[in-house]
Image: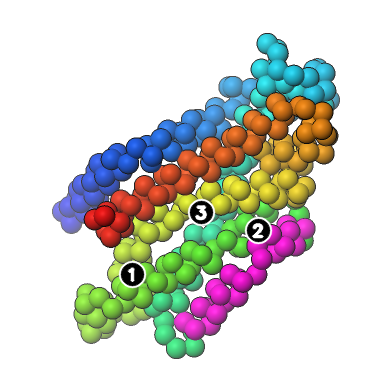
Amino acid sequence: MTTSIARARRRESAARVWAEFRRHRSGLAGLAILTFFIAVALFAPLLADESGLDVTQATGEPLSPPSPEYPLGTDESGRSVLTLLIWGARVSLFVGLLATVISMVIGTLVGVAAGHFGGWSGATLNRLTEWFLVIPFLPLAIVLATILGRSLVNIAVVIGITSWPGTARLIRAQTLGIEARPFLERAKALGAGHWHQMTRHVLPNVMPMVFANTTLTVAIAILSETTLAFLGLGDPLRPSWGSMLDSAFSSGAITTGAWWYILPPGICVVLVVLAFTLVGRALEAVLNPRLRER
C-alpha cells in the first residue's frame, strides 16, 4: 500500500514537472534537438555503413566538395564526411554523458558530505573542492589524458574528475540550507544517524538541483571532449566531432577552403551544447521554486 502511494506521488510529481517544462519553448526546442541527435547516434548503423570509417576502403577523392554521392564532401582520406559525422555523434555523446555521470557522482557525494559534516572533515572537503577549482582545467586534463592513455573511457574519466568542483559547491550550499530545516532537526533529536540523515532527508531534497545541473554539465563535458580531441588526445580509432575538427585543421582544410569538412562538426557541437543548455535552464526554472515564482 505504501509503495503504491509513493509511486502515485512520483507519477503526479513527474506530470507536474512536465507540465511546467512544456511552458518553456526554449526548453522544448532544446529537447527536440537532443532527441534528433540521440536518434542519429542510436541508429548510426542504419544510417551509415561502418566500413566507411576505414581509411583503406575509402573510394572518394581527398577533400572533394559535396556531391550527390557524398552530400557533405570527403575528408583528406576520401571518406564521407557525413558518415564520420553520424558515427562521431556516438562518441561525443557517449563521452559527454559518461563524464557527466562521473562528475555528478563525485560532486554530489563531496557536496553533501561537506555540507552535512562539520569540523575538520567538512573543512577538508571544502578546501579540496576549492583546490580543484583554482587549478586550470585544460593543463590538468592534458596531463591526466597523457598519463592514462588515449581511449574513450579514459577521456571521460579525465573530464569527470576535473569538472566536479562546481557541482560540489552548488550541492554543498543546498545541503547547508537543508541542514537548518526543522524536519532534519527532528530526525537528529530522534536519534537518526548520519547515513540516515543524508540518504533519507538531504539527498532527496538536493536531487532536483542535481538533475538540473546535470544537463548543464553535459554541455561542458562535450565541449571538453571536443577540445581534447582537437588537441590530439582523443581515441584515434574512433571518430568524434572534435577529432574531425583536428583532422580538418591538420590537413589544411581551412587554407584550401574545404568548408564542408569544418562547418558540419562545428555546427553539431554548437547545436548539442546549445540544446543541453536550453534544457538545463528550463529544468532549473521548473525545479527551483524561486525561479518558478519569477
* Residue that appears at 54% across and 59% down: 103
Reading the image, the residue beneath label 3 is 217
* Residue that appears at 24% across and 56% down: 293
Type of secondary structure dominating the magenta stretch: helix
Q: Identity of the amino acid at label 3?
A: Thr
Which image quadrant is residue 188 in?
Answer: bottom left
Q: Secondary structure at mark 3?
A: helix
Q: Identity of the amino acid at label 2?
A: Val
Q: Identity of the amino acid at label 1?
A: Val
Q: Foreground: 33 or 205?
A: 33
Q: Foreground: 189 or 103?
A: 103
Q: Residues within 10 Å of mark 3 (few under 14, many from 20)?
A: many
Reading the image, the residue beneath label 1 is 202
Reading the image, the residue beneath label 2 is 158
Q: Foreground: 177 or 23?
A: 23
Horizontal and vertical percent for residue 71?
66, 17
Residues in magenta? 122-146
Q: Secondary structure at mark 1?
A: helix
